[in-house]
Image: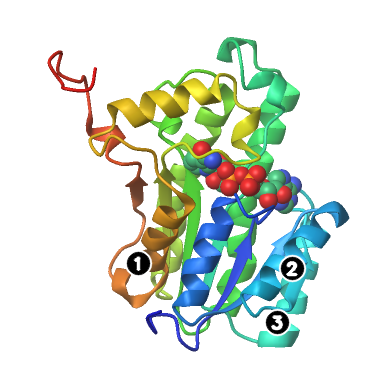
Amino acid sequence: GSELLKGKRGLIMGLANEKSIAWGIAKACADAGADLAFSYQGDALKKRVDPLAAQLGSTLVLPCDVGDEASIDALFESLKETWGQLDFIVHAIGFSDKNELRGRYVDTSRANFTMSMDISVYSFTAVMQRAEKMMTDGGSAVTLTYYGAEQVMPHYNVMGVAKAALEASVRYLAEDLGKKNIRVNAISAGPIKTLAASGIGDFRYILKWNELNSPLRRNVTIEDVGGSALYLLSDLGSAVTGEVHHVDAGYHVVGMKAVDAPDI
Ligand code: NAD
């Protein structure tokens, strides 16, 4: 690999298994020489995350439920004890009741709206509050978003509204933390079959639609996302902040595909 992140320390949040977007990003960072720490939600995931972390030479695997302030504090206290200082963060976390990731947005409940915003939006801000104090040499943070923030996508519903708020928070965080040379960006990834995505209605149809209609005529992989994250997390992206960077095979630029496109 390159040495783009040699000597840099990064926290990866949201690794569940080898299909996770966090895994694609973690692999790219480790390959570029980074030292990594991982946080996982709940004991059930520890036994999955431990061996994956070990594959990338990391033994720093810590619990964190981002719905709980004390749990976020505990994570950063442990990190501070071990590392002192932090260079980058990957926030690959989102959650909504899957019963509301189908059917109509208008039927969203207040309880699930609030919970989805808390876990999928506020958690990134909560994490950056703690990270700011540890990013004493500047830093870079990346969160994950989706095109459903910008345009209506079937079944995405409350998560689309949450991702729109997440993208707005990226811009506010970029301004607040820019003075400390901490950069904050989002990657808007095309659909990828992960645990979280399997909760979305008609997900196979959404994948096929993107494959047929994106300029590159394919879906994206977690390795594609990893490469773009490496750019944003390393000095290659040194003047990039507040950005929502699409890694979607170009899907977001297409208004309507030509009738005579060869593969319809
Ligand atoms: P995933 O299921 O592998 O990862 C989601 C992670 O969120 C899991 O590790 C889960 O433990 C974590 N999480 C949920 N609630 C949490 C909590 N309270 N505390 C701590 N962690 C919690 O799925 P993924 O697709 O890799 O998702 C990562 C991010 O990418 C999410 O923000 C998702 O919305 C976004 N995204 C996914 C796609 C896609 O098609 N898969 C596309 C664009 C954006």
Q: Earlier in the sequence, mark 1 or mark 2?
A: 2
Q: CA distance from mark 3 to mark 1?
A: 25 Å
Image x and y of residue 108, in percent: 65, 17
Does the CB distance between marks 1 and 2 fall below 8 Å?
Answer: no
* Disc 2 packing (10 Å; few <14; some 14–19; many ≥20): some
Image x and y of residue 145, in percent: 47, 43
Name the residue beneath numbered marker 1. 231
Which residue type does callout 1 highlight? Tyr
258 relative to 12 in the view: left or right? left
Ligand 1 image-quadrant field: top right
Name the residue beneath numbered marker 2. 51
State which mark lies toward you, 2 or 3: 2
For the point 74% across and 68% down, the residue is 51
Which residue type does callout 3 highlight? Lys
- Can residue 91 be seen in this snapshot? no
State which mark lies toward you, 3 or 1: 1
* Disc 1 packing (10 Å; few <14; some 14–19; many ≥20): some
For the point 43% across and 75% down, the residue is 180
- Can residue 90 be seen in this snapshot? yes
Name the residue beneath numbered marker 3. 80
For the point 37% across and 59% down, the residue is 228
256 relative to 51 in the view: left or right? left
